[in-house]
Amino acid sequence: MVTVEILAIGNELLIGDVLDTNTNWIIKKITGIGGQVNRSVILRDNLDAIATEIQSALQRKTEVIFTIGGMGPTVDDMTLAAIAQSINQPLEANKEAIAFVNQKYQEFAKKGYVDDSKMTPPREKMGILPMGSIPIDNPVGAAPAVISKVKESTIISLPGVPRELKEIFENTLQPILKEKFGEIFFLEKVAIVDSKDESVIAPILNAVSQKNPQVYIKSRAKNFDIDAKFKVTISCCSSFKKEVIQAINKAIQDLRQELGNAGISLDYIE
Amino acid sequence: MVTVEILAIGNELLIGDVLDTNTNWIIKKITGIGGQVNRSVILRDNLDAIATEIQSALQRKTEVIFTIGGMGPTVDDMTLAAIAQSINQPLEANKEAIAFVNQKYQEFAKKGYVDDSKMTPPREKMGILPMGSIPIDNPVGAAPAVISKVKESTIISLPGVPRELKEIFENTLQPILKEKFGEIFFLEKVAIVDSKDESVIAPILNAVSQKNPQVYIKSRAKNFDIDAKFKVTISCCSSFKKEVIQAINKAIQDLRQELGNAGISLDYIE
């Protein structure tokens, strides 16, 4: 499985002004195309902290590293400078990126989104990339997304405004994602188990997991209550759809049997 | 300011089944009592990854490290084992914690939440702590929270079920938080700025920030639109309430003036 890490950047996330929903959105997408997100981090707008984190991800030979946020015109937007530092490349005005930003402000001025279209240092900043990095079209914002390749890793830098991030991911990023992740099939089922007590189903899940190493089985902890039921997720991922379906069905069959042996019913499968 | 890091643990977070709202909840609380959250991480249920992350936080001399999740009876709940590994302590059955879990299952059995109250290995697991760690009352769940002190750092391990986490934080954890954070005053104001274009206000915010180093000023990037307005947050934190209010007022005054010089109005303050 292609390994993925996500780095969301911005003080607003770490003082609690903003709940980070971007990371969860990307995690779902990556899981759906068969990638494995190993880790996600939120950092403040601090150049060294961001650069150190990217270096760590590169040292772990993470195949795809997403950065979210810190791509705008303000001084505290420093994602690209941190990437440059972490991959030992100078920052340079990227002709294509500058032309992109310029074009965007001309469009925005026509639409009345901004007062004028002239390039200023804060606007130009969004076209200054680590040398060798590539700008990617942002269908709705002014700052291009940026791809930086280093050895076995690809760093994909997306803006933090949710609408921009989603538009880029769903549109201009698709060819790169297809190339990286190929065609993978992911399936997840949720079993509703009629037990109030996770400590009772713990050894059962463990036994079923050992019998089905290809399948990932996990119970969801919840409040104790008189009518509590547990959700158990059973998921599997492979290039072969048939293999995934067979593995999930086999694990559910084993789970139903082991639960039955302990006098617990598997109510239904979602 | 007391430095804080948060580590949320659980595959369910990194396959996208669950949006992590616990971290944001704790961040808000910590910001409110004057702590500075420098970083938050989500990791999978992997012993070495969790232990390595805790070690990194300790190396950064982080004063308070929160772990969230991985405290339950299942085999994939391994937070306490990871802490033991990261602080070089063996795991041991903690008498007080075992008695706590035992007591809880007796209560749960009486209420009909579980079928019987007898201690089993999965239940006992929740009372096995790193040597020297201290269990803290969990008013609603079976697993105690755990405090582990190492040199200048305090690791606070909370369960991942939101209701349990919140009850512990608001109740049994308060004396420890008061001891760590003291009495701190935090204030944040939001200025609504009548500008559609972050690239125009970027240099203004920079100038105001330089004039007001004690105050933290940040614009919130958003979609381009014909009637877009920018939110600018202005926040400050100190042991002295009067100092905080004066600093915020001074920064708002400077912001209003600098914006005015550029022909931009500060619409209102929230």
Image (cartoon, coloured by chain):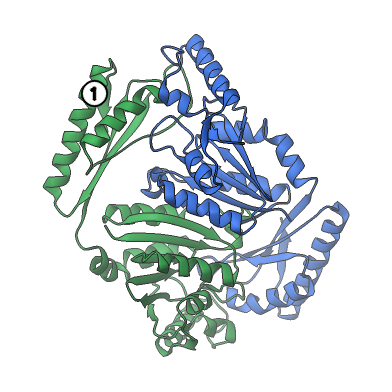
Chain colours: A green, B blue
Does residue B148 lie above or below A163 as drawn?
Answer: above
Residue A254, x across and y down, in percent: 20, 29
Quarter in which the C terminus of chain A is drawn: top left
Q: Position of residue B52 (x, y in %)?
A: 48, 54
Which residue of the protein is positioned furthest toward the right in this rendering?
B242
Q: Is residue A164 left or right of residue B178?
A: left
Taking the spot 79% from the left edge, 67% from the top edge, the residue there is B251
From the viewer's side, name the closer residue of B104 and B198: B104
Q: Is residue A164 visible?
A: no
**Which element carries disc 1, helix, strand or loop?**
helix
Lateral position of residue A158 relative to residue B68, left or right = left
Q: Indicate the position of residue A81 as horizontal and vertical percent values.
A: 53, 78
Q: Is residue B239 above or below residue A82?
A: above
Name the residue at 59% across, 27% down.
B138
- Residue A236 in sight: yes
Above or below — where is A6 with respect to A72? above
Of residue B146 and residue B213, the one placed in the foreground of this image is: B146
Q: Where residue A4 appears, x then y in whole percent?
A: 36, 60
Which chain is mark 1 on?
A
Quadrant of the rendering where the N terminus of chain A is positioned: bottom left
Q: Residue at x 65, y 66 (%)?
A: B218
Is residue B247 or residue B137 the one in the foreground? B137
Quadrant of res B97: top right
Q: Residues within 10 Å of mark 1 (few under 14, many from 20)?
A: many
Judged from this view, the residue extending furthest toward the top is: B110
Q: Amino acid at mark 1?
A: Glu
The residue where tag 1 is placed is A258
